[in-house]
Amino acid sequence: MENKTSYRGFKELECWKKGRELRIKISGITQSFPKEETFYLTAQIKKSSRSITANIAECYERCTYNDMRHFFIQSRGSATETIDHIITAFDEGYVNEETCNEVEILAETVFKLINGFIAYLDKSRLRTSKVPIPNP
């Protein structure tokens, strides 16, 4: 996707970039899920994977420690939820073990990157009363 604007913001964060990669991977995987799962597992796993990047984007310019931390924690929870949904897809026979493992590894990477950003926020708060927006 070519960037047509000069705004970069949240799109520069590694946790958002990896979350986007995960979201795209989930979207492709769910295309092969059975039709009867459209409003169940398919909807749930798409929603959780989309929530990762959406929460990061929503909070990024809020500039308050509490808001940013809250939304990053929500994003982290969505990464964990996505892991559970892909395990369910494996248990139901909708994905093979290799695909399940790939998604789990990617989601765990997103989880760890989000934890790193939360740690950055926490350390920044100790140094100053304002939360600095990082320049990637």
Image (cartoon, grey):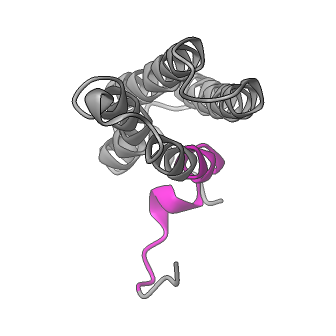
Q: Is residue 8 magenta?
A: yes
Disc tally is: 0
Image position of 27 with respect to 81: above or below: below
Q: Is residue 36 left or right of residue 3?
A: left
Point out the residue furthest to the left here.
39
Residue 112 position by quadrant: top right
Q: Give the overall secondary structure of the magenta segment.
A: helix
Q: Is residue 122 magenta?
A: no
Residue 83 position by quadrant: top right
Q: Residue at x 60, y 53 (%)?
A: 17
Image position of 42 with respect to 119: above or below: below
Give the image location of residue 75, x and y in percent: 43, 29
Give the image location of residue 115, x and y in percent: 62, 24
Image position of 1 with respect to 30: above or below: below
Q: Is residue 16 left or right of residue 55?
A: right
Q: Residue at x 51, y 51 (%)?
A: 28
Image position of 37 with respect to 88: above or below: below
Q: Residue at x 43, y 24 (%)?
A: 78
Give the image location of residue 44, x and y in percent: 32, 27
| Front residue of this view, candidates 84 and 28 | 28
Q: Quadrant of the C terminus?
A: bottom right
| Front residue of this view, candidates 133 and 50 | 50
| Front residue of this view, candidates 10 and 77 | 77
Give the image location of residue 76, x and y in percent: 50, 24
Q: Residue at x 49, y 46 (%)?
A: 23
* Magenta span of residues: 5-22
